């Protein structure tokens, strides 16, 4: 093979390699762009999930504080049931209606 043909073959090989490198660069840039977009979207979704989780936890705290309030009222000697609500209760005996409310208060809210 003459030197000119060798040079032409080398030139063609270099052009093919250049095209391959350019193609790989474009693929890498697209992948990096997609990766960045996914990171941003992931962060936004995490923030949204945190907000939703915080909102979901709020009623549990309210239920807990409401239950604690009812327990305090009951333990201080007053009825919390709808039959005798607010009337004095004999501290030595329990009211089954009041106890039913205390035992089932959180159950109904969780469902």
Image (cartoon, grey):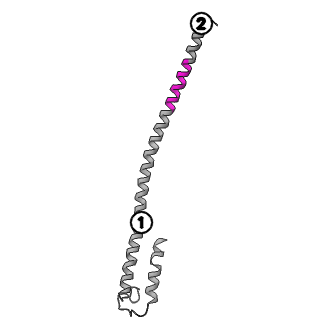
Place of residue 83 in the rendered image (x, y in percent of width and height, measured from the top left):
41, 89
User: Could you tell which of marks 2 and 1 lies nearer the N-terminus?
Assistant: 2
Residue name at image x 44 percent, y 42 percent: 37
Q: Main secondary structure of the magenta part?
A: helix
In the picture as drawn, the residue positioned furthest to the right comes out as: 1
Q: Is residue 87 magenta?
A: no
Mark seen at residue 84: none
Residue 89, above or below 52: below
Place of residue 54 in the rendered image (x, y in percent of width and height, measured from the top left):
40, 62
Mark 1 falls on what kind of element? helix
Q: Which residue is mark 1?
A: 57
Instruction: Classify residue 50 by image quadrant.
Output: bottom left
State left or right for residue 65 relative to residue 25.
Answer: left
Residue name at image x 55 percent, y 18 percent: 14
Residue 72, above or below 14: below
The residue lying toward the viewer, choosing from 21 and 100, is 21
State left or right for residue 86 relative to residue 100.
Answer: left
Place of residue 4 in the rendered image (x, y in percent of width and height, measured from the top left):
58, 6
Instruction: Classify residue 57 by image quadrant.
Output: bottom left
Find out whether the residues at labels 2 and 1 contact each other: C-beta distance under 8 Å.
no
Q: CA distance from mark 2 to mark 1?
A: 79 Å
Residue name at image x 44 percent, y 81 percent: 102
Q: Which residue is mark 2?
A: 3
Mark 2 falls on what kind of element? helix
Instruction: Classify residue 86 by image quadrant.
Output: bottom left
**What range of the chain is rendered magenta?**
14-27
Q: Is residue 22 magenta?
A: yes
Residue name at image x 47 percent, y 84 percent: 100
Residue 84, above or below 60: below
Q: Quadrant of the N terminus?
A: top right
Place of residue 55 in the rendered image (x, y in percent of width and height, measured from the top left):
40, 63
The residue lying toward the viewer, choosing from 19 and 101, is 19
């Amino acid at each position: 093979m003459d030197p000119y043909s060798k040079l032409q073959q080398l030139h063609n090989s270099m052009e093919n390699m250049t095209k391959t490198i350019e193609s790989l660069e474009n693929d890498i840039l697209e992948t990096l762009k997609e990766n960045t977009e996914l990171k941003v979207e992931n962060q936004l979704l995490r923030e949204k999930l945190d907000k939703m989780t915080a909102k979901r936890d709020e009623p549990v705290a309210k239920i807990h504080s409401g239950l604690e309030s009812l327990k305090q009222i009951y333990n201080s000697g007053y009825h919390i049931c709808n039959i005798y609500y607010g009337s004095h209760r004999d501290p030595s005996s329990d009211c089954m209606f009041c106890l039913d409310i205390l035992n089932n208060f959180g159950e109904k809210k969780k469902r």
